[in-house]
Amino acid sequence: MKNKTSFPPQEGEARPSRCPDNSAFKQQKLPAWKPQLTIATVLSSFFLIGAFCLAVGVCLVLSANSVREIQIDYSDKCSDCSKLRENSSNWNKECHCSVNFTLKEDILGDVFMYYGLQNFYQNHRRYVISRSDAQLLGRNVNIQKSYCAPFTTYRNGTPMAPCGAIANSMFNDTIDLFYNLNSSVIQVPLLRTGNSWWTDKNVKFRNPESYNLSSAFAGTARPPYWQKPVYLLDEEDERNNGYINDDFIIWMRVSAFATFRNLYRRVRRIRQFADGLPAGNYTFHISYNFPVTKFKGRKHVILSTVVWSGGSNPFLGIAYVVTGTAATLAGFVITAIHLKLRKKKTYFQK
Amino acid sequence: MALSVDSALYRWQRLGAESPSHTLSESTPLLFPLRGKSNLNLNKCRIVFPNNGRQWEDWKHASTFYSGNRIQTTKYTWFTFLPQYLFEQFHRLGNLYFFFLVVLNWFPQVEVFHREITMLPLIVVLLASMIKDAIEDYRKYRFDKMINLSKTRVYDKMIWKQHFFKETCCRCGAPDTEVQNEELEKRAKVKKRKKKNENKRVIISNLPFGSKKWKENPNRYYDSNKIKTTKYTIFTFLPKNIYDQFHRFANIYFVVIALLNFVPVVNAFQPEVSVIPICVIMAITAIKDAWEDFRRYKLDKEINHMGCYIYSREERAYVEKCWKDVRVGDFVQLQCNETIPADILLLYSSDQNGICHLETANLDGETNLKQRQVVTGFSSQNTLFEPEFFQNTIICEMPNNDLNKFKGYMEQPNHERIGFNIESLLLRGCTIRNTEAAIGIVIYAARRLETHKELDLDDEDFAKLQHFTLPPVNIERRATYKQRTMRPLRRCQSARAHFQGHTRNRSLGRRDSNQSQVAFSSTIEKDVTPDSRLLRRVREAALQTENLSPFMKTSTSFTDFFLALAICNTVLVSTATEPRQRVTVPPPIKPSGITLEKIHQMFQRLKLASLSQSFSSSQSSSDLGASFSAKNTEEHLAALDCCVNDDDCCASGRGDELQGRGSTDIGGASLDEVFKSVTNSSSPTDFCYEAESPDEAALVYAAQAYSFTLVSRTPEQVTVRLPQGTLLTFDILYTLGFDSVRKRMSVVVRHPLTKEIVVYTKGADSVIMDLLEDSAKADVSTEKRMKRIKEKTQKHLDSYARDGLRTLCIAKKVLNEDDFQKWANFRREAEAAIDNRDELLMETAQHLETKLTLLGATGIEDRLQDGVPDTIAALREAGIQIWVLTGDKQETAVNIAYSCKLLNQRDTIFTINTENKETCESLLNLTLEEARKNYEVEKPRRKFFGIIPTSFSASEAPSPKFGLVIDGQTLNIIFQGGLEEKFLALTKHCRSVLCCRSTPLQKSMVVKLIRRQLKVMTLSIGDGANDVSMIQAADVGIGISGQEGMQAVMASDFAISRFKHLKKLLLVHGHWCYARLAKMVIYFFYKNVSYVNLLFWYQFFCGFSGNTMIDYWQMIFFNLFFTSLPPLLFGVLDKDVSAETLLDLPELYKNGQNSEIYKLSTFIITMLDAFYQSLICFFVPYLTYEDSDIDVFSFGNPINTISLLTILLHQALEMRTWTLFHLVTMLGSVMFYLVFSLIYNAACVICNPPISPYWIMEKQLSDPMFYLLCLITPVIALLPRFVIFALRGTFGASLILKAQQLDKLPKAQRDLEIKKLRSRKQATSSVLPASNDDLEQNISHFCLSPFLHPAAAAVSHGDRESWGLSASEANPFRKQTPEEGYSFFNRWAEEESTAVDSSAGAVSGHYPLVPSRVTTHGQDSGKLTKDNAHNFNHGSHRRSVSAVTL
């Protein structure tokens, strides 16, 4: 007790009041709204929710149904190659294979080509952190301090560029699409750039500053699983080379699940492909480099369109429809209960 | 402390009693081997041999047996530290758990982490607490050492010269050389600033040392008066504050977590991120601490700069100086109403008696005045004090923490010593009152008492507080039982704890008080309405007296009685126009009176504050003439009624019943010369009386009501105005103050008319009755009459007690001059004695107070405070079982219980009073059996009605319930004899339990027993110092501030000013608190479970690698910022039901008792809901994004957002009250989350390696899918809960829901509905009185029709003995017992009586009882009985007119 606080209480008048402030906050008498669940609010909320969800759900389902998608598993189709790749000593041996498929009808609109991987745990914790964003920004950093281990340097001390497990395991199959039109084979024009996020390409990933790329990466070595150094990822396009290579950027955005797809190419809408892919026979020419049999994985190549609500996954629409139905049903049930019990209510019911 | 002293005393007495049988011969027992073997067993008894060489052998033998005086409180030694410490640590479950984890990790199959790393947390925790323990132990060791090394003098034969050690405290009789040595030593230690070993303080006047010679002043080493309560300075703030904060275990935990994250192998977060929470928490705490400290600093500054007058040599006057400049040795002049700047030795007071009044409200909260006295024997009292001539050296003890003890002496230049003690010390912080000026010398500057340090939390408190931060623990205990005492309702005797107060002021009229130290001054009931009949008689008597006055030989017994009432109190008289705070100049001409005891006796007296000029009483007649002799006046009983206006709280009432009784004629002188002519004034002056106990003031007011007005009271004189208007001025010769041993107070006065010396004694009835004049010498008729008078008085006393009044007896004694002179010499001698003054004073007092003549008896009623029965009824309706623990007499307690509706007239009351264990046990068994029998009969039916409660017709008469009355002795037996379980089993069947005559210790033991055995929440409420232990023993202690001082309040958790506020405190705030806390705790569990589970679900998809899809910052901020404020606000401001409804429907409180909100099922349901919600929050996004090119953070971001929305919306569903704050925090949380995410995701490219969520939020916000997800998922997640809520309102509407609906209704309709609801409740609750047995739902209190009538009570002989009356009249209960009081109890009482006391056998015949008191009282008491009966029937708590008998 601070015994000095109250000084001479002169006739009791001067004594400071020890009452707390009579403010609404301190007396907990703030004006308050006390919501009450009445039959009106409950029912209206149920029915409103139900109607809204049903409407949105129907839209979503319809739009998801308009998506055309073709998915081809090619991990076993090139059985020789997969066997070859099981032995890592054959890393420099080339292996090609081709996969044929037929489009029954046209795929109209923008067509996206994905590669899909199954059972590849890109989201494993140790894998996810094994990167150095500073290095990918083109800064000259000491990657020894980064999380790239064990893919930081070679034994002789040469740093890897780019370092880390994610970069090292980059998907390196090359997939080309050919359209077989009347025994003539036309290569479908595919866009290699513009597939990644604009911010990634322009902000997050930068090549080291130098007069040319090879000198910029001088003193570094390619990751062990790579067949060529990073400055040779796209020899044709300077703006798609090095760290800012779209394939590389997309790979570096680690996917959330073990089964995933990454955007690989987009169909360039020119000539006969101006409206999309016409129906007919197509062939994928694949240079098979990425081994999946070792981790019991699968590889796909996927051709798909997109709509405003995403891809072909109809789940969200179904979820809306189901929720809307459930809410409406609950509303009806509650109405029934209320009507049944209303006669019994004697008090507290307005 | 008091307890240990008591027990030691007891042991000592027992040994003393046993010792004669053992001391067989003068030689020591060891010399007689045979006998020695037989009875010298050092294990059994303690034999102490003097260590003076005579019995060297024995002493040596024995002393090896006894432990030394060395104390050791340390837990460990150097060698035992490690093993013992480890052993203790592994007693803790938490450590064992960690240990188990470590062991698990040593098995390769289950190894998760590296072994070394799993050991890390354990080792850190162990190390930290080890260091803490070691430091604590070291401190204990140092403290022990200090105590063990403190010096004492021990006789040693080997060294012939006596070896003088320094004593721990200085005494007046210490040899001169010692002091000189002290001073020499001091000078030798000039360099040392702090002198720790010195235990005396030598103070001389500062005046000889001017400013130049300051260096030579021996006072310069003492602390200055500047105070500093701040904890930190600017420079020490950071380190010290951080150190303080790391004292909290929670902070250590966070630090350990953060540290762990710095270890690469185990880091879950980035190390920097993991530091954030602890930093934020510590920063907030630091800011708070800094602010508090700054306020303390400002306060200090303010105090340090307060002014006071200090004597300055240069100016030869008192000059004003700041407090902080006050130095030890300064002379300070204090004015009235000034606060004392330092501890000052009082040297002069403007009061002629050398008394200075001070108010200690700032120190201990007591507002009454205390007296301080100028150092006894200090010569300069009569002249004005001149500091220049002060040449004494003051030697006193070093600063310590004892508020009440202080000793020292003053050495004059001629080496003469004057001792002084606490009575002369003015404590810092007190306020001077009623004294114009006081001068003193500063002894201790700043803090002698270290009051600030006392208030710092010690370790234990700290630990307790920490405990309270774990809400679930507290909530799980159900607040079912309430422990209560009736103290707030009454003021009564108290056995006060020893720790506080000033022993000098003793309250009067408290029977059992050991040390009632706390006095209080409150405005006391003034308007005493006198009983008209008694008033008439008094007037008649007065008239007669006046008529006869020339020949007056007697003062009537009436007069005597009321004179005694008026005189025999320690009161302070003041008038309304001159309140006591104002100083009045004492009248210049003062009748000198007898002055020889002036110096010694001033303690007991209170100063006259004002002297009124003229007095008159309107009804006084001027016609003096006839004579009157009051011969054997019949007993007259009066009832007067005082309307009490208690301190700050209640307009409680108090009825005084006065019974005067005639005594024999007393010869005296004529009244002529004293009777003055009456000056008439139109308005009688209004007198205010302030007394240490309200009872005293009540008595004075009562006398005033009968026109015996106490007009003034000085230490020497007391003036009373008689009904005739005559002013009678008595010289007070002596005042023998009240003490708890004598239990009485006496005043010796010289009667102005008769000039005879009269002793008026007022005291506890039991004591006074024993001291009455032995009538054996007188003739037969006188003896008979005396006996009859005594009996009748006793009867009245009993009836008073039965009515709940506090009784006092008033007696007188006439001394002749010789005897008085003899005694006065005696007394003076005693007062002059130094050694055992207290004992001598007591002896002389006892010597005087013998052979008294009974004048009358008074009964003082404590009127209940407002709204007590109402509150009790409400609390009971709320399902709280109420116990009353009181120190009152049994009858008093029972009647109070009736009057506050604690007991019902129809209740069956079991009374257990016994001193014997066997009897007690059998009584308990019998009662229990009886109670169970009734219960068994009702049980099946109850069950039936429990299923269909409404089908029962309420026609059946409500059955009586049980009440249990038990007294302190029996409680003791129960505690000692291990009968607690039976006792508790019995109390479970009882509606209410009354424990009478219980000591503070017993009160706390009862509380602890209930807490321990029944595992319920207990609440203690009390207002007196004797409730302190009980208040502290209970889970919740509530103190009522007001009448009995502040001790209860200071010991309590909550303080209220009136008992009726308990209703609101419990029913409203208790309910709210429970509802808020429970909901908030559940909500926090829910929140964390639902959020953390998101991460868990993700582990199924990332190979259980511990990866998270949410960014660390967002994850850590989620609990810290995004979702922290709304639940906090919810926990502070939510009101599920409005206060009015809660007050109107006490049943709502059961909600908390039965833990309806925080119970296992709710918890499980909430957890399941949390699981469900987290599943939805995770899997809806998962299924949406399945098989797409979504990346980790783009997946986590919607999940985080969704779960934020869900969690907040969930809370919105739970909230019953929406204020602006709620809305703002809700929206603010969401907004803050979005803004933070946007900024963070835009700004941070690589600031958070290795993975950065760069641009995620922006990207997501541009994606329609994100919005669709955020809409649907919370809806799916909360839909079930919403459905349940909706259905809950439709189907099983709980009481809370009903109450909530009630809140919505307009007021009139609401009242109507509540009435309806309550009437329904009562209809059912008459069948199901489960209101008070929430402990176990299956206990009910049914009594069947045979017990419809009031109960019988079993009485023990103990009561009878203590009353010293014939048994047939001893027990008032018996009188009330109707004939149909069933024989069971009679038989039982008989058994008990015969078992315990054979003499009771004859008595037990009375048990088949005569139904009413009418026969015993005769016609006289007829009205009384009727009135009483009336009271009882209606259970009215306001007994304004309780009894009149003539």
Image (tube, rainbow, N blue to C red):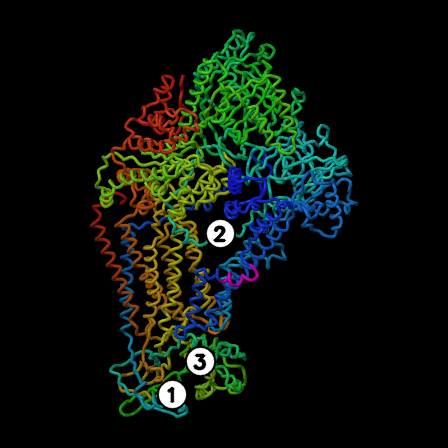
Is the Cβ of the residue at disc 2 closer than 8 Å to that at disc 1? no
| Distance between mark 2 and mark 3 Cα atoms | 51 Å
Inspect the image, locate mark 2, and give the three-letter code of the amino acid beneath it: Leu
Q: Name above or below for residue B500 compared with residue B239.
A: above
Question: Picture coordinates of residue B1092 (x, y %)?
Answer: 39, 64
Inspect the image, locate mark 3, and give the three-letter code of the amino acid beneath it: Ala
Q: Dot 2 falls on which chain? A: B
| Distance between mark 2 and mark 1 Cα atoms | 66 Å
Residue A180 vs residue B1211: left or right? left
**Earlier-in-chain disc, 3 versus 1:** 3
Nearer-the-camera pick, B614 or B947? B947
Discs 2, 3: same chain: no
Nearer-the-camera pick, B816 or B33? B33
Q: Is residue B411 visible?
A: yes
Q: Nearer the viewer, mark 2 or mark 3?
A: 2
Please check the rendered image and state whether residue B85 is part of the magenta-colored stretch, yes or no. Answer: yes
Residue beneath disc 3: A165
Residue at the image position 45 percent from the left and 43 percent from the top? B1037
Residue beneath disc 1: A289
Please check the rendered image and state whether residue B1199 is part of the magenta-colored stretch, yes or no. Answer: no
Q: Which residues are magenta?
A: B77-86
Residue B322 vs residue B675: left or right? right
Q: Dot 3 falls on which chain? A: A
Residue beneath disc 2: B465
Inspect the image, locate mark 1, and give the three-letter code of the amino acid beneath it: Asn
Is the Cβ of the residue at disc 3 closer than 8 Å to that at disc 1? no
Give the position of the C terminus of chain B as an image quadrant.
top left
Q: Name above or below for residue B44 compared with residue B112.
A: above
User: Circle 1 — which element?
Assistant: loop
Question: Picture coordinates of residue B417 (x, y %)?
Answer: 72, 36
Q: Nearer the viewer, mark 2 or mark 1?
A: 2
